[in-house]
């Protein structure tokens, strides 16, 4: 099991555009995805992008069943997405609370598109294509933003809805630990 350090907001790798993966199925990619899965599980994340562990490649993973950091979230199927592409299926936007392993201890309200189609490949090079809406669509957009050097606070429109978890949600255990 290889749990990697999650880089925090301000680290230069998190501000860069990640490079496309040239060889899906390579031993290096398979190891990266294993480490990402281990890291996401250890941190109770809903998703993780390769740049968050210092790897500037276009790889994200996400999935939610029961997650203490998102107790009210609907389930999202576990997905490995290499070289993702997103097509918006609506212009409708919805605001919702987000957190991020790279912005520990904080949450903010972020506007996101409500319905989209995403495509790419899994770690073995098999095509992946799905439609997503609601929380699923939010998670996909959040993780893919990391591949373009964008963290959720950059998407916020009202910094009055940004703060430390324990101040915003007193008595609730939504911690990043």
Image (tube, grey):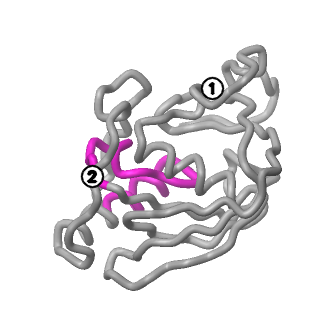
Q: Residues within 10 Å of mark 1 (few under 14, many from 20)?
A: many
Disc ID at residue 32: none
Residue highlighted by disc 2: 19
**Pick the front one: 56 or 27:** 56
- The x, y position of residue 37, in whole percent, is 41, 62
Tell me the quadrant of the picture where the C terminus can be found: top right
Q: Residues within 10 Å of mark 2 (few under 14, many from 20)?
A: some
Is 139 on the left-hand or right-hand side of 123? right
Is 73 on the left-hand or right-hand side of 61? right
Residue at (26, 63) in percent of width and height? 21
* Picture quadrant where residue 2 is located: bottom left
* Picture quadrant where residue 133 is located: bottom right
Magenta stretch, residue numbers: 35-57
* Picture quadrant where residue 123 is located: bottom left
Dot 1 falls on a residue whose secondary structure is strand
Tell me if residue 60 comes above or below residue 127 in the rendering: above
Residue highlighted by disc 1: 106
Tell me if residue 31 comes above or below residue 169 in the rendering: below
Q: Residue furthest bottom?
A: 126
Tell me the quadrant of the picture where the N terminus can be found: bottom left
- The x, y position of residue 41, in whole percent, is 49, 57
Q: CA distance from mark 1 to mark 2?
A: 28 Å
Residue at (34, 41) in percent of width and height? 17
Is 145 on the left-hand or right-hand side of 111? left
- The x, y position of residue 98, in whole percent, is 68, 38
């Amino acid at each position: 099991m290889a749990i990697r350090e999650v880089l925090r907001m301000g680290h230069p790798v998190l501000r860069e555009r990640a490079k496309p993966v040239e060889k899906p199925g390579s031993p290096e990619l398979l190891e990266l995805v294993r480490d990402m899965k281990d890291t996401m599980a250890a941190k109770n994340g809903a998703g993780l992008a390769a740049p968050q562990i210092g790897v500037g490649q276009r790889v994200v993973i996400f999935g939610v069943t029961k997650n203490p950091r998102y107790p009210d979230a609907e389930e999202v199927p576990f997905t490995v997405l290499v070289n993702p592409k997103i097509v918006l299926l609506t212009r409708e936007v919805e605001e919702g609370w987000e957190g991020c392993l790279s912005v520990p201890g904080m949450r903010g309200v972020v506007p996101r598109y409500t319905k989209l189609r995403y495509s790419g490949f899994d770690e073995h090079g098999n095509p992946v294509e799905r439609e997503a809406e609601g929380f699923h669509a939010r998670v996909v957009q959040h993780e893919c933003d990391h591949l373009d050097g964008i963290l959720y606070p950059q998407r916020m429109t009202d910094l009055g809805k940004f703060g430390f978890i324990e101040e915003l949600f007193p008595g609730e255990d939504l911690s990043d630990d």
